[in-house]
Amino acid sequence: MANFIIGILILLLFCAAFGLFSKRSKKTRDEEPPSEPEAAGMMFDRKYVGPSLYRIASVLDSGLDDAEIHSIETQIAEMTVSDKVKDLGTFPVVYDGKETEIRIEAKLLMEGEDKEVILHLFSDPELVQILDEELMAFADELGI
């Protein structure tokens, strides 16, 4: 009889542990994963970095001034092809009357004899859409 009671207790403990685990597991499945920051991006010749950033600055109420754009160009000029993605900084901007930030990352690649830059601009989804549209328009105007 004692073995029977011990067996029942073990079975109850096992079921309780399984129930707790499955509830915790369900809660984890139901939670939304953390959202990735949104980014606009483009790859182009290094000489177009400054003009593309001035294009971006033109749609902002304020932010990305001459000194910040020059700093970004300088950091990219100092990069080598072997560098990994480099965080060029987070810049406070105002777009559509709202204060926000744009974080800029770059990766330098070698395409033939030319150095190409992949530029990523991270921000709020609404602003990222505008940045992406401006970068695409810039590329279309250059025919790239």
Image (tube, rainbow, N blue to C red):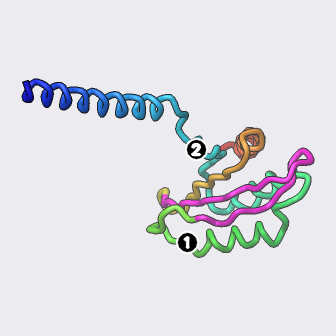
Which quadrant, please, contains the C terminus? top right
Magenta span has 99?
A: yes
Q: Is residue 72 above or below residue 54?
A: below
Give the percent coordinates (x, y) of residue 88.
Answer: 64, 66
The residue that label 1 is drawn on is 79
- For the residue pair 141 and 132, the one nearer the viewer reads as 132
The range drawn in magenta is 87-110
Residue 122, x across and y down, in percent: 67, 51
In the picture, measured across the screen, residue 75 lies left or right of residue 52, that is left
Q: Does residue 81 belong to the magenta stretch?
A: no
The kind of secondary structure the magenta stretch mainly shows is strand
Quadrant position of residue 143: top right
Which quarter of the image is occupied by the N terminus? top left
| Residue at point 67%, 52% (across, down) | 121
**Which amino acid type is shown beneath numbered disc 2?**
Glu
Q: Residue at x 84, y 65 (%)?
A: 65
Taking depth in this image into account, of 57 and 139 the one nearest to the observer is 57
Q: Nearer the viewer, residue 119 or 111?
A: 119
In space, the residues marked 1 and 2 are separated at their CA atoms by 26 Å
One can see residue 26 in this view: yes
Label 2 crowding class (10 Å Cα cut-off): few <14, some 14-19, many 20+? few
Q: Which mark is residue 111?
A: none
- Helix, strand or loop at disc 1? loop
Q: Is residue 91 left or right of residue 112?
A: right
In terms of sequence position, does the residue under pointer 1 or pointer 2 come before the other?
Answer: 2
Q: Secondary structure at mark 2?
A: loop
Above or below: residue 116 compared with residue 129: below
| Residue topped by disc 2 | 36
